[in-house]
Amino acid sequence: MFRTFLAVAPWLATAAVAEACNTPTVVVERDGTAQYVSPQADNRAELEVVFGNAPTDESILVFDARNGQGTWVSKSDLSLIGIGFNTRDAEVVYSGPPECRPPELPIALPDGAPIGEPTELFPDGDPGTRPIDLFPDETAGGGPRSGLWRAEVGPTAMEGCPPMMQDAFPASQGALPGMDGDQRRMNFADPFHPDTLEMSRTTGVRWQRIGDNRWQTTDMAAAIFAQIPQGEGGGSKLIWTLTVVSPEEMTFARAIDIVLPAAALAIMGGSADGCRVTGTDRWIRIGD
């Protein structure tokens, strides 16, 4: 008889949404926990074959896995089952479709912990409080936040440059102007614009907006690059591209384009497409 019930029990314990509330069963586990199970399909006839006929139509079966016994009890005695069958904490929790749960039973969570009715946060009505601003110092448009920032200088790569020029550029350009040292406190305008940066004022560059939170300038050392003889397609220049990745991070992509005349390339070597020196540095916010 007990073996027959074990074959049926896993199916009984399945908590599935049902169109109708079928005859429930209370299952007391070996550890004393008890669940009031509303099965997916009605199984009253099968249970009566195993455990005998129910006394009334309102009777429900309590199966105690600790002794393998099944007992029909009145549904009106539901609140007494926990005490009468010595369940854990003298409690029975519900497992099944929400619409079939007796109001006096808490719900069984997936990890087995019961919960009762949800607590009303504002029983007297919505107090109308304003939302809390988590970042009151965040600038408009997602600009950088003032605070303590650190410079991370990326490596420099060269492409198409004459061999004799490669020693002229170190593997790393070093910290950007206005960002000397490992870290420093930065205060940004709101709304943000890179023309207000100390490095921009020091070097005298002006930035042009090229997209959302992206700016570019070719003002850096423009006079020096203008002295380099121009090749076909234009002259040489240094291009800075600033991107505000987030309020906590900015990137500075640097690209030096050197375009030499064909006569110079014949002597020095290098690519006819020009010499390009690139790298990307970052500013990272590390605290207030």
Image: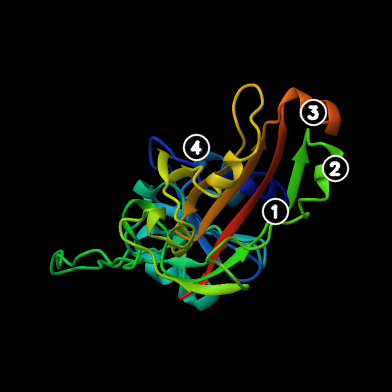
| Cβ atoms at labels 2 and 1 below 8 Å apart | no
**Mark 2 sits on what residue?**
164
Q: Amino acid at mark 4?
A: Ala
Q: Amino acid at mark 3?
A: Leu
- For mark 3, give the secondary structure: helix
Q: Position of residue 66 (x, y in %)?
A: 66, 67
Residue type at tag 2: Met
Residue under pointer 3: 265
Label whose residue precedes the other's in the sequence (3 or 4): 4
| Count of picture labels | 4
Q: Which of the marked residues, 1 or 4, is nearer the chain's N terminus?
A: 1
Real-space CA distance between mark 3 and mark 2, rounded to the nearest whole angstrom: 11 Å
Please name the residue that numbered disc 4 is placed on.
41
The crowd level at tag 3 (other Cα within 10 Å; few <14, some 14-19, many 20+) is some
Q: Nearer the viewer, residue 236 or 99?
A: 236
- The amino acid type found where label 1 is placed reads Phe
Instruction: Please state if 264 lies on the left or on the right of 189 as rendered.
Output: right
